[in-house]
Amino acid sequence: VDASGMLWVSDHANPGHLLRIDPATGLAVQSITINAANFGVSYLQNFSGLQIVTKAFALHGVTVPVGSLLVFTGQPNTDLVVAINPSTGAVITEGSTAAKLSLAVNYDLTAGVYDAASGKLFVTRTNGGSGTDIVAIDPATGAQLASSATGITLGNAGLAIEPATGHLWLGTQDLVAQVVEYQIGATGALTELRRVNLSNQGINQNEITGLSFDASGKLWVASTQGEVYKVSLA
C-alpha cells in the first residue's frame, strides 16, 4: 500500500506485471511489465514480495528513496531484490550502479520486506534450511545474518512490518486464515508473539499470499483468489 492508499500487486502471467490498483474500484491504473534485464526473469508468480519504502536506505550501496517500490523475487538463482521508481518502472541507479541485490543463497523466497528499525531485509525460505525459515539479510551484501524456523510451510506467503510496533507479520496459504506476529531481535532472530484468525473477516480459502500495512496501521491481505482484504487485528 503506497502513501496515497493505492495498492501494488504482482500477477501470475508470463511476462508478469506489477499493477497499481485503485482500492475504490479494483481497477489497475498502472502496469509495469516484468523483464529479465531488470528482474532476472520475465515473471514473478508466487515467488515474490512487494513493499513501498517508508524510510530511505541503501540497497547494494545505492540509496533507495522513500516511496520507492521494493521488489523481491525468488525466481532467479540466486534470489534478487530490486528497487524501482514506481512512477516510471525504472530501476533506481546512482551513477552506473543499480539498486539490485543478489542474495548470497538461493532461498526461493515467496515473500520479503525491509525493516527500517533493524536495517535488515527479511525473506521467507522454501529451498534448504528447515523449509520453514524466515531469514534476515544484510541489504549491503546479500549475506545471511540470522535464520528463524517458523514451523510453517511458506509456499505462498506475505511479510509486513507493523508501523506502530515494529513487529514482523507473516501470512501464508498454509495457515488457512491466520497471520502471525513476531518480535525482531537485535541479531534478526524472531520470537513469535501471537496468531490472529481472520476467518470471520472472509479469509477462509487457504488464500493468503501477501501482506501490507497502510498509513493508518490497517493490514491489507492479498489473496490467491484475486482479492485484497482490509482487515482488523483487534
Image: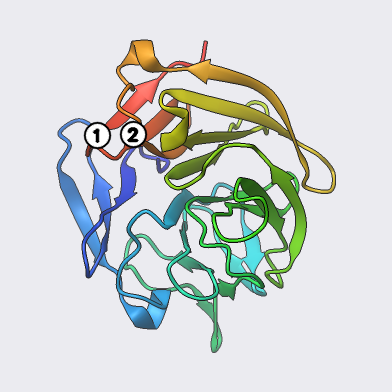
In the image, residue 219 lies at what x, y percent? 45, 27
Colour setup of the view:
rainbow
Q: Decide: few, some or many residues near mark 1? Use Cα within 10 Å; few <14, some 14-19, many ≥20.
A: few
Q: Nearer the viewer, residue 111 or 60?
A: 111
What residue type is disc 2 on? Answer: Glu
Q: Decide: few, some or many residues near mark 2? Use Cα within 10 Å; few <14, some 14-19, many ≥20.
A: many
Q: CA separation, marks 1 and 2?
A: 9 Å
Local SS, label 2: loop
In the image, residue 230 lies at what x, y percent? 35, 24
What residue type is disc 1 on? Answer: Glu
In the image, residue 116 lies at what x, y percent? 67, 48
Q: Are marks 1 and 2 in contact (CB under 8 Å)?
A: yes
Residue identified by numbered label 2: 207
Kindly identify the residue that appears in the image at 74 percent across and 51 percent down: 147
- Residue 201's tag is none
Q: Nearer the viewer, residue 105 or 97?
A: 105
Q: Nearer the viewer, residue 17 or 55?
A: 17
Kindly identify the residue that appears in the image at 66 percent across and 73 percent down: 104
- Residue 227's tag is 1
Kindly identify the residue that appears in the image at 51 percent across and 62 percent down: 108
